[in-house]
Amino acid sequence: MRPARAALLAVLVAAAAAACRSDGPVAVRLDMPGVSPFPPGAFEEIIVTGFRTVTPLPDLDLGRELAAYLAAEVRRAFPGRVTAGERPAGEEPDPAAWREAAAGRDGAVFLTGAVSLTSQVRKAVQNVDVPEGPFKLAGRGLIEQVRWTLSIDLAVISGRTGEALFRKDYRESRDYLELDKPAEFAFSDLSAILRGRLLPTLLGTPTIEPRTLLRR
């Protein structure tokens, strides 16, 4: 059964079950087929290169860490070969440099790009208990938190032509109350979130999405 038809069948079954009850809307989670910009069999090998680091960090090799993380995740979802490769020198290597790096592997594509991880201390309003007289009254106070933002400029480069087949910018942020939250911790959190957006786009892998069924 095709993924889209299987997902539709799951919705109908859940809807029928909801119709037999007297309660309100029902929250469900469905496996939804991913949509990839590449036709099936468009490439046989994915070469993951080190990413160019836009914002160097003293204790984290961001480009190398992201490449290692993506290679491991892509191997779990892609049936072909996944290998590590070197990114040609320069901020934007020309097609000839990519063709040379592919070394005649026409069925390969490069997964590459640029990455940055930045932090910013922000003030936020939070409900607090304010002691006033014999009672504690609800109040609002300012707190400081640090916002880490991971940005990835992702590119898929053809090994045969050296031209970009696909480009997309990914950006994800998360706030932490601990102002000294390490960059490694934030990178781990944010890269896991971005993985859920990247793999369905790149490989068409299914995603689990929430839906609400309304009973008539």
Image: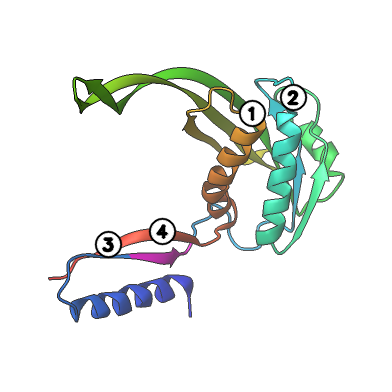
Residue 80 figure quarter:
bottom right
Q: Amino acid at mark 2?
A: Asp
Whole-Å distance between the Cαs marked 3 and 2?
44 Å
Residue named by callout 3:
212
Residue 49 at x, y = what percent?
A: 76, 39
List the residue tagged with mark 1. 183
Residue for point 48% across, 28% down: 177
Q: Secondary structure at mark 4?
A: strand
Question: What residue appears at the point 80 percent right and 39 percent down from the top-left corner?
Answer: 99
Task: Kindly identify the amino acid type of the residue bearing the numbered disc 1.
Answer: Ala
In primary-sequence order, the first of circles 2 and 4 is: 2
As drawn, the residue found furthest toward the left would be: 216
Q: Residue furthest right?
A: 103
Residue 209's label in the rendered image is: 4
Instruction: Sort mark 4 into few (<14), some (14-19) or many (20+) by Cα contacts within 10 Å.
Output: few
Residues drawn in magenta: 28-33
Residue 7 falls left or right of residue 13: right
Among numbered discs 2 and 1, the one appearing first in the sequence: 2
Picture coordinates of residue 43 (x, y %)? 70, 56
Q: Earlier in the sequence, mark 3 or mark 2?
A: 2
Please tell me how crowded label 3 is: few (under 14), some (14-19), or many (20+) other residues with Cα within 10 Å: few
Foreground mark, 2 or 4? 2
Q: CA distance from mark 4 to mark 3?
A: 10 Å
Going from N to C along the chain, the mark reached first, 3 or 1, is: 1
SS category of the residue bearing label 3: strand
Which is more toward the observer, 142 or 156? 142
**Residue plotted at (59% across, 51% down):** 202
Classified by dominant secondary structure, the portion drawn in magenta counts as: strand
Cα distance between the residues tagged 2 and 4: 36 Å
Residue 59: give its label. 2
